[in-house]
Structures are given as structure tokens and as C-alpha cells.
Amino acid sequence: MDDQMMKGRTICPFLRTALKAEVLDLEAKTETAPQETLQELLGGGLNGLGRVARFFAQRNHTRPDTPPGRYDPLNLVGSRGSHPGDSGILSARGFDPQRFAEFVAHAEVGPEGAYMTAR
């Protein structure tokens, strides 16, 4: 999926990247992606974000006509890409470098580099 097709449709940087790399298996007819893919991409274990992402895909990003097990990564129905947990790093105004710096200031350093925790 090219940038023009996504422009203004999803402001989530993760979903935009995943859609552009075609790792979400977007179905053209319904413009939906499998919820399972989020869990696989982000990890399904206790420390993985996959379960959380799948939960929100089921709860916030579906419509009544969405096929079972899929969600709408383009329109982000329910949250519209802006929700209480939103980092504020990317918005309709664009990338906010100051907000990004504030966000990653909480990163912890481990043997494999910096990482973020739920805390």
C-alpha cells in the first residue's frame, strides 16, 4: 500500500510502517487486517504487546460489518488514532520531536540496547 492511499487514513506510525511493508495482509475488499498478525508481530507472551494490541484491535478498531478475527487498521474506528494512551508523537500536524524525546527519556538500557516497558 503506498503513502497516497494511507494519507490521512491512519496516523499510527506502527500501522503505517506495517501496512507499507505489507506485513499486515490487508484485504483490499474490506480493508481489514488479521488481529492474529498484531499478536505475532508484537509478541504474544506476558511481556509482549501483541495481546494488548489484539485486544484493542478487537475492541476499538472494528465495525459491525468487520469479518471475525480482523480489524480496520486504516480508519482506526473507535479511537481514530487518538486515545488516552496516545504518545502524541505523531498527529495530524506531523512528527513532534520534543514529544518523542520526552517519551523515550523513560527508556531503560539493557544488554541489547534501549527498551520501553509498560511501566
Image (cartoon, grey):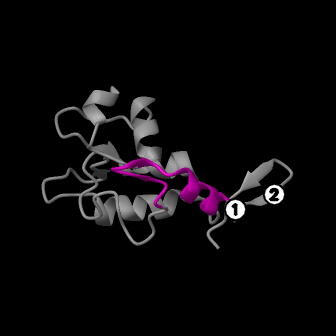
Position of the N terminus, as image quadrant, is top left
Left or right position of 112 against 103: right
Residue 109's disc number: 2
Q: Amino acid at mark 2?
A: Val
Residues drawn in magenta: 88-104
Answer above or below: position of 31 versus 113. Answer: above
Q: Residue furthest left?
A: 65
- Whether residue 117 is in magenta: the answer is no
Q: Residue at x 46, y 60 (%)?
A: 88
Say which residue label 1 marks.
Answer: 105
Q: Residue furthest top?
A: 2
Crowd band around label 1 with a 10 angstrom C-alpha radius: few (<14), some (14–19), many (20+): few
Dot 1 falls on a residue whose secondary structure is loop
Q: Position of residue 116 (x, y in %)?
A: 67, 60
Q: Residue at x 34, y 57 (%)?
A: 81
Q: Residue at x 36, y 48 (%)?
A: 11
Answer above or below: position of 96 versus 21. Answer: below
Answer above or below: position of 14 versus 21. Answer: below
Which of the 4 image quadrants contains residue 105?
bottom right
Position of the C terminus, as image quadrant, is bottom right
- The answer to whether any part of residue 52 appears in the image is yes
Nearer the observer, disc 2 or disc 1? Answer: 1
Crowd band around label 2 with a 10 angstrom C-alpha radius: few (<14), some (14–19), many (20+): few
